[in-house]
Each structure stands twice: as structure tokens, then as C-alpha cells.
Image (cartoon, rainbow, N blue to C red):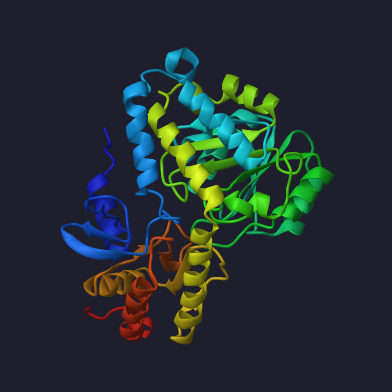
Amino acid sequence: MLVRDFALELEERKQAGLYRTRRHVTGPQRPSLIADGKPLLSFCSNDYLGLANHPANIEALRNALPETGLGGAASHLICGHHDAHHRLELRLAEFTGRSSALFFSTGYMANMGVISALAGRGDTIFSDRLNHASIIDGCILSRARVRRYAHGDVPALEAMLAETSGHKLVVTDGVFSMDGDVAPLAELAKVCRAHDALLVVDDAHGIGVLGPEGRGSVAELGLSEEDVPVLIGTLGKAVGTSGAFVAGPSMLMDYLVQKARTYIYTTAMPPAIAMATISSLDLIERDQGRRDHVIGLVSRFRREASAMGYELMPSRTPIQPIMIGDNYGALALSQALEKRGLLVSAIRPPTVPVGEARLRVTFSAAHSQEDLDCLLGGLSECRHLLQKTDVAI
């Protein structure tokens, strides 16, 4: 019997500069943390509003525990759908301006469950080439025909839609997680209406950050439920808790309750998490100052990092990639910054296309201007690495 050589595959990944490791983080998520026993200033978290460690959310979680207990104990369709889950779903529908919402365990499970429920054999899914892995896997799981269009290329998508018959699903990230740019949502909504296609937007990195009161990239453009019938978002990024949701017409949400396997066949999230999330949504709505502070950090970073010669992506979000290209070059710069007390992750294929390795800098409302001083100082000291990918650091 032939046995696949997993050890050889691991070694090949190491040789290609693609081997990944986990860090052991001690203490709560915040800019100053202990990783692998070392104090580091982190610029790689998705806690964009600094709410993962907010006292009000911690208190809401603590206060809920005596009433809800720890675990969900069963799936939503058995006896796991707690009143706290129901209250959160009502709050999410209100927050997103949608008729109804469902609370999922993770963003990955939400995308896989929603896409595979809404399309199947004989249908066609159109997916942006830079969509998140969870969208890609949802498309594969659906067994529908999948056509990928060039990143953000609405005319190319429209041409594909025009030549395709039958049920059509268009799916896109709202904010792209590795580039930080925002999808052309208004144009996508227009072509989907014109060609009778169902538009699904995963706004994992837009919720909390963009739009009025942090309601996301869809709300920023004033797009209605009719424009974007299926809105997906995560709660473990800007919201600072855990889980995910899908929001849209009540009929579609009911359909997903019947058909989305990642909702039906899994244990419900701890109800206390739902209560902490309601607290966090309240904070997001009323505290514009957090978003303004992040915008200020991003603006200053872009201005000063560009002046140093770093190549940045055209992003106005807290996601600010520094383009390197070479895998080893990205690792070298990340390691050099870490020696200076800065934690900035190197992102390599297959997360990004081959030849587009980068450092993914992310900002949080918990960062101070002094924290940004440290990052810019480290980048200034490491500029020499931009021209060298084989140096010893």
C-alpha cells in the first residue's frame, strides 16, 4: 500500500518559506501582549476597535453566566437555542437593517453553510478571485458550477452573468482580508439585479469599522436588503467577541434554518457570548471616536510608511499590507521587526497569490500614537531589507 509522505511535504513547505507555526499568547488580546514568553507590541490582530478586552463586555459576559451557564449543550434545532441567542439575532437584524438574522458559530461555518444551502448542482456561483478561503470552500461544498471573476472586475462579471442561465449566486467579501480594499458593492448590486442573480456579501472586516455607526461596508453605501439580500458578518473581529451571523429576508433565514448544515448539525454557541456581543454592538453604535482614532492611525501610517519607500496597497481600512513579493523577504522583515519588539505577521501563499507575500499590518482603536511611533521607528530601521531577501537578521 502506498502511503503519502507527509513528512516530506512538511519539509518542502519549510524549504519554500511556507511553513507556519502557532504562537503561545499569554493574557488578554491587546496591543501589548506576551507571545512565546516575549513582550511584543502587536500589529496583527483583527480586534479593530479594541473591544475584545473592554470592561463592559467582560461584565456582560460575567453577569450572564449564572443565568445561561457555560455551554450551548445542543444544536439550535434541538434545545440549544437559548433566549440569549434569540435576543442577539433580533439585535443583529436591527443593527444591520435587515428583517432577520441567524447566529452561527464561526465565520467559516457561516460562509460554508450559507453558500452550500443557496446553490447546488445545476446552479452557478460567481466568486471574486480574492475571496476568503471559507467562501472558496463553501463554493466547493455546494457542488455548483463555480466561475471566478478577476478581482473587483464588474464588467467581467457582468459578461459572465449575461451568458449564464439558471440560478445564479454572486459572492464577494465586503472588505478583502489580505488587501484591505473594499468591493465595488453598489456596482455589484446593480448587475445582480439586472441579471437576476442573488448577491451574498461577507462583511467580516467591514462590520464595526465602516459605515454609519459601524454598520459595515454595505450600510456605508446605503444598500438595502433588496440590493444585498444575504449579508454575512463575523463577531470575532471588530465586535471583539466570537461567532458570526447571516442577515436578510425572513424567508431566506427560515430557509437556512432548514438547509444550512453548519447551522443545523453543530452545538450552539455559549449563550453568555451572545449577551457580551449585544453589549459590544451597543458600544459600536455609540462610540464613533474609536473609528475616528483608527482612521487617524491609518492615515498617518500610510503617509509616513510610503515616504520610507514601503509599497502599500490602496486600502482605507485598518488592514494595511506592506507588499514584499518574496516569501523569504517577508519573513526576514517580520523577524527583524520582532527583534525590535514588534509583532507583524508575514502572509505568504496560499493565503495570497504566489509572488505577493506581504506583511499584514492591522490597526486597532487600542493602539496609541506612541505605539505607531514604535512601528514606524522599526520600519525605518529595517528599510535596508527591502532590497535584500537573503540577509542574516
For the residue pair 248 and 332, the one nearer the viewer reads as: 248
Quadrant where the image shows the N terminus: top left
Q: Position of residue 4 (x, y in %)?
A: 29, 41
In the rendered image, the residue lying farthest to the right is 194
Q: Residue at x 57, y 36 (%)?
A: 92
Q: Position of residue 145 (x, y in %)?
A: 65, 38
Residue 147 appearing in the image = yes
Q: Quadrant of residue 392?
A: bottom left
Quadrant where the image shows the C terminus: bottom left
Q: Residue at x 57, y 34 (%)?
A: 91
Using the image, determine if residue 2 lies above or below residue 356: above
Q: Position of residue 377 (x, y in %)?
A: 33, 81
Using the image, determine if residue 91 lies above or below residue 299: above
Q: Quadrant of residue 368?
A: bottom left
Q: Position of residue 350 (x, y in %)?
A: 43, 56
Q: Is residue 133 left or right of residue 166?
A: left
Total of numbered circles in the picture? Answer: 0
For the residue pair 5 and 291, the one nearer the viewer reads as: 291
For the residue pair 262 and 238, the one nearer the viewer reads as: 238
Q: Residue at x 45, y 85 (%)?
A: 309
Q: Residue at x 40, y 17 (%)?
A: 74
In the rendered image, the residue lying farthest to the left is 37
Using the image, determine if residue 247 lies above or below residue 302: above
Residue 355 appearing in the image = no
Q: Is residue 195 left or right of residue 207?
A: right
In the rendered image, the residue lying farthest to the top is 78
